[in-house]
Amino acid sequence: MKHRLAQVAGATVLVTLFAACASPDSGGILATFHGGVVAPSPTSSVPSPQHTYSDLTSPDRQTVDFDPTLRVPGMTDPPPGSGYDRYLGQTVTWGACDPASGTMQCATVLAPLDWNDPDGVAITLAMKRRPAKTAPPDPASPDLFINPGGPGGSAMDYVVGFNPTGLTGFNIVGMDPRGSGKSTPVVCGTTAQIDSFFDLSMSPTNDAEKQALIEGSKQFAAQCRQNSGALLDHITTIDTVHDFDMVRQLLGNAKFNWMGTSYGTFIGAVYLELYPQNAGRMILDAAVNITENSSVSQADGFDLALGEYAKWAANKGYGGQTADAVMKQITDFTVALAADPISVGDRRLTQSLFVQGLALFMYSGTAAYASLAGVLQATIDGDGSYMLSAADAMNDRSDAGYGSLATAFPAIECADEADDGIDASFAQWQQDAVSAPYFGRFMGPNTICQVWAAQPAPQIDFRGAGDPPFLVIGGTGDNATPYQYAQWMVQQMPAGVLVTRDGVGHGSYSSGSKCVDQIVRSYLSGGIMPDNNTTCPMG
């Protein structure tokens, strides 16, 4: 597997969300560049990856009947005209989003469902921007596109909480990638149907549980195909990158400026591979694995993060006197939950939901430790409501149902990643359980992509040919994207300049390191690139 992707949009509010359960003692630079307004130019085709590999055959993917004429929300007829010109001739009209958005502005544009068929059905792309705070206002202010990860996290929501300090000369733009947020969404069924998938035992201990997981995954995948139709064939990051380059032109940017976190680094890497001549200032924070090296799994990152929590907890006297004792308490409780879930109203905190909830806390690093200690104690004492809320945040579930992250995540991940099938996935799981004894064991095998009801995109063999210098940031204790992924990215794409944040938690910008923040702002606003292999402390 090339890259296991994960970023939780709700992770940044986790400490506030669970503060009530914490223990009692927890106590501008202006941009100076812009390439000029770019008039849309006629295009006869879109670029395809120049280098791919094909050793993964995805042998167990399903063929599911669906209505090819189905239109999910946001699918519509294309703009007037023909070919790509009909899209490149669109006018972007910014308007007020809603009363709570203040000065934020929103807009929509259309893009081809199939970039190889610009005269076919169109989809809707939605975006939000925080206008540049120049004095006087400058209509030629450059755009900085941002993305929080996922895949499937809402970039429009991310704009609201994004820290613009030192970047006041940029319009901060968040466009929800196809399939997610307010753009044309992936649809996978009712809340009850999606609940039935997340309620499965993700780490089966016998043949019956294994078969139930496989069959449940097949059913979920089939529901996504039947409810999303042809969208699943055009939901890849390659498609999304074509969308971004179109919007770059529509907004008048000579260059594409990008700051992507987690999965957002994959969008950035694909953009650099397909459109290096259009790449401006590119920051890839919390890099995913774009290589064929599978020696470090995502579970290794989560186990490293949990181990750091266990050290803190032991020092504070929560759950045991040593880190090993804390880990044993958590592991023993997790095992017991398989046979004895905790009732929470008309739902249950199962073993799998407990593990997902626990994983959420790893995203916020040390800031979430006190809250996690309180939630773990409450859960062990029989109150599963807090951890179930964490699992729901991880899975993008609310009282209103599931958000797009729950459905866009598998749709995009499975469109991007080819695989070796079910048997290989279970074999990999056994290896992960050795290298990562907690999360490697309890996260279970990846079964959803193996039985997905659409075929994957060509697997890009990244070369980085023609790339301008760009910034790659990795955290030594990143849970979702282990630090090695950032190191591998700059090896695979030599124009990358590596900055290391020495600390835990997912993502480095605006996460407690003034050094990282200054590097990001100096690069974006002034084009000042740090020395390769710069290391930044927290604080």
Image: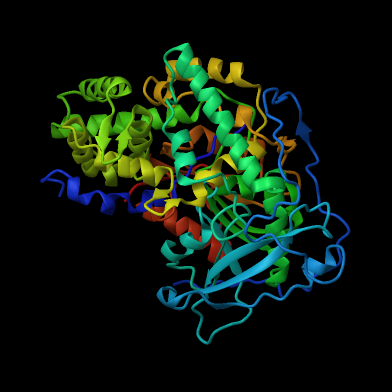
| Residue 260 in view, yes or no | yes
Image vertical order of residue 230 relative to residue 59, above or below:
below
State whether residue 526 is above or below residue 285: below
Spot the residue most to the bottom: 136
Residue at 84% across, 67% down = 85
Q: Nearer the viewer, residue 207 or 298?
A: 207
| Residue in front for this viewpoint, 496 or 189 | 189
Kindly identify the residue that appears in the image at 64 percent across and 47 percent down: 228
Q: Residue furthest left?
A: 24
Choose top left, top right, bottom left or bottom right for residue 198: top left
The coloring applied to the image is rainbow
Q: Position of residue 86 (x, y in %)?
A: 82, 68
Classify residue 72 as left or right of residue 129.
right
Q: Quadrant of the N terminus?
A: top right
**Front position in the image: 404 or 479:** 404
Q: Position of residue 310 (x, y in %)?
A: 25, 30
- Where is residue 281 drawn, in percent x and y? 61, 59
